[in-house]
Amino acid sequence: MPKTAKSEKSKLEKIDESLKDLPTSTNVKAWSFQIDKQYYVILSYFIPRIGNQVAVFTSNKKGIKTSTKPIVLINNSKDMDKGYEEALKILVPEELEKSSELSDIET
């Protein structure tokens, strides 16, 4: 029997599979994802007088942020998915373009 070639997963599929919920001991909600060998954390939290915010930071493997400057900061939002999408637009724009081109061809 000839071996069938396994279809390789796209970079976006690998990133989506790495997205996971992180446990926290506070009211902050956190998710982690990985792009190549770099880890990122998405935080959803409330700040008095400012409101809800979603921010994406670089992090270590455990999901602890390693920078104080967010890659993405969305005010007045609890939508983790929006933060994730905005981060992908900044971190891997070429993969999103490939994905949209493929979906245009398939339809």
Image (cartoon, rainbow, N blue to C red):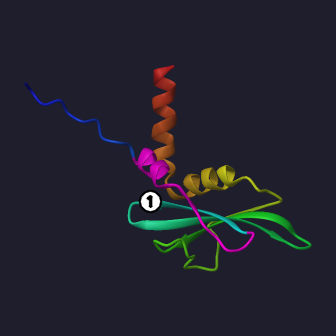
Q: Is residue 92 magenta?
A: no
Part of the protein shown in magenta: 11-27
Whether residue 70 is situated above or below residue 17 in the rendered picture? below
Q: Which residue matches tag 1?
A: 35
In the rendered structure, the answer to whether residue 65 lies left or right of residue 83 reads left
Q: Position of residue 15 (x, y in %)?
A: 46, 52
Whether 20 is among the magenta residues is: yes
Q: Residue placed farthest to the right in the image?
A: 49
Q: Nearer the viewer, residue 60 or 93?
A: 60
Which of 94/71 is in front?
A: 71
Query: Foreground: 101 or 44?
Result: 44
- Residue drawn at 48 percent across, 32 percent down: 101
The residue type indicated by label 1 comes to Ile
Secondary element at tag 1 = strand
Q: Quadrant of residue 46?
A: bottom right
Residue at screen point 44% across, 59% down: 35
Instruction: Give the answer, above or below, for where 87 lies relative to 100.
Output: below
Q: Quadrant of the N terminus?
A: top left
Q: Is residue 35 found left or right of 63 in the rendered image?
A: left
Q: Identify which residue, 63 or 99, lies in the foreground.
A: 63
